Image (spheres, rainbow, N blue to C red):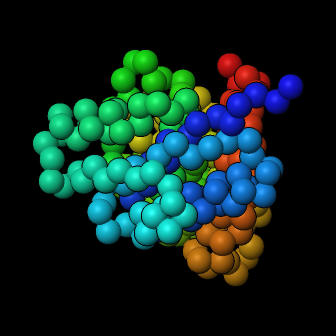
Amino acid sequence: MERDPIRLAILLSGTGRTLLNLHERIVDGSLNARIHVVVSSRANALGMEHAKRLDLATCVVERKRLTDETFQARITKAVSGAELVCMAGFLSLWRIPDEWLGRVINIHPALLPDFGGRGMYGRRVHEAVIAAGREESGCTVHFCDNEYDHGRIILQRKVRVLPDDTADALAARVFEQECLAYVDAIRMIADGRCV
Ligand code: GRF
């Protein structure tokens, strides 16, 4: 018998493209999950507009208005009730309480451990990959610990870097793979295939 849908908390700060991807896979039945809450570190994030339009539960925990201690506590409170926390373009650091370790994942648009770390997000990642002359890039889904883009890797999907690639063109090809990788990783965790 299929298990109950895994309850996800989605943490974002930006456009919410990963949120939209996960929501679409849930709606088309290919991902047995439910979005328990969408938490944003920015009140005006486009991802929050998507979440509201889709009638999802939302919570804003604005990094810039809070002390670090309060920010940490409010994020922890906001995700309670979820089974798995999925970072989806979340640009603040949530120091993961012990009880959540192993239940928080992130997707990064490069092949970690390369091209990760604080400040390495979005276009900058792809520019760095091209500048380094790499022939391969891709995406990484990993468990989170308390360092940026760090923690046990769950899976990676690769793309070729083309000779005349631009950062935007590479980002678009990587994002196609992100959409597949994140859904696969969530399925693996929900099915207990990732212990
Ligand atoms: C993800 O796709 C991943 O590359 C990174 O942030 C992206 C989503 O952020 N973690 P956004 O929706 O483009 O703001």
| Quadrant position of the C terminus in the picture | top right
Please say if 4 is above or below 115: above
Q: Residue visible at 55% across and 30% down?
A: 83
Query: Is residue 170 found left or right of 37 in the rendered image?
Result: right
Q: Position of residue 182 (x, y in %)?
A: 67, 48
Observer-nearest residue: 150 or 85?
Answer: 85
In the rendered image, which quarter is residue 113 located in? top right
- Farthest front residue in view: 55
Q: Is residue 72 above or below residue 34?
A: above
User: How many dots with numbers?
Assistant: 0
Horizontal side of residue 25 vs 76, given as left or right? right
Comparing 35 with 126, the one in front is 35
Q: Residue at x 65, y 77 (%)?
A: 169
Check the image and name the residue furthest to the right.
1
Q: Answer whether residue 47 is visible to the viewer in this image.
A: no
Residue 12: image location, x then y, percent: 43, 54
Location of residue 124 in the rendering, given as x and y in whole percent from the top left corner: 46, 66
Task: Using the rendered view, name the quadrant where residue 48 is placed.
Answer: bottom left
Quadrant where the image shows the N terminus: top right
- Residue 80 drawn at (x, y percent): 41, 31
Write down the quadrant of residue 176 in the picture: bottom right
**Residue found at x 75% / y 46%:** 31
Residue drawn at point x = 17 percent, y = 34 percent: 69
Q: Is residue 70 visible?
A: yes
